Amino acid sequence: MQQVTFTETEYAGKRRQIRRELFLIEVDQVVPWKGLFTQVEWRKRCMKPPSCGSSPA
């Protein structure tokens, strides 16, 4: 196993962000994830007939 130098560790923290990373950071700021997950969970629970209150046909 090769030892990591101080220069390598310093450079690893300062590397340039690629477009994909910048896009994902921007999406995280724009999308209301908590509300979206709440809606998805509600729909997932609603797919089961007893929890939705609908009677099976």
Image (cartoon, helix red, strand yellow):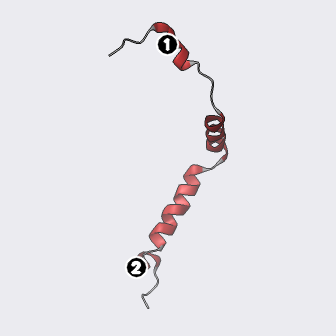
Residue furthest top in the image: 6
Residue furthest left in the image: 1
Query: Callout 1, which amino acid?
Result: Glu
Q: Secondary structure at mark 1?
A: helix
Q: Give whichever of discs 2 and 1 has the lower sequence position.
A: 1
Q: Residues within 10 Å of mark 1 (few under 14, many from 20)?
A: few
Q: Position of residue 34 (x, y in %)?
A: 55, 51
What label sits on residue 8 in the rendered view?
Answer: 1
| Residue tagged 2 | 50
User: Which of the 4 quarters of the picture holds residue 30?
Assistant: top right
* Vertical side of 8 occupied by 30: above or below: below
User: Which of the 4 quarters of the picture holds residue 1?
Assistant: top left
Q: Say left or right for 31 vs 41.
A: right
Q: Name the foreground residue: 27 vs 55.
A: 27
Residue furthest bottom in the image: 57
Q: Residues within 10 Å of mark 2 (few under 14, many from 20)?
A: few
* Vertical side of 3 occupied by 24: above or below: below
Query: Callout 2, which amino acid?
Result: Pro
What label sits on residue 35 in the rendered view?
Answer: none
Q: Position of residue 18 (x, y in %)?
A: 63, 31
Q: Secondary structure at mark 2?
A: helix
Residue at 53% over, 58% down: 38
Q: Position of residue 55 (x, y in %)?
A: 43, 87
Q: Nearer the viewer, mark 2 or mark 1?
A: 1
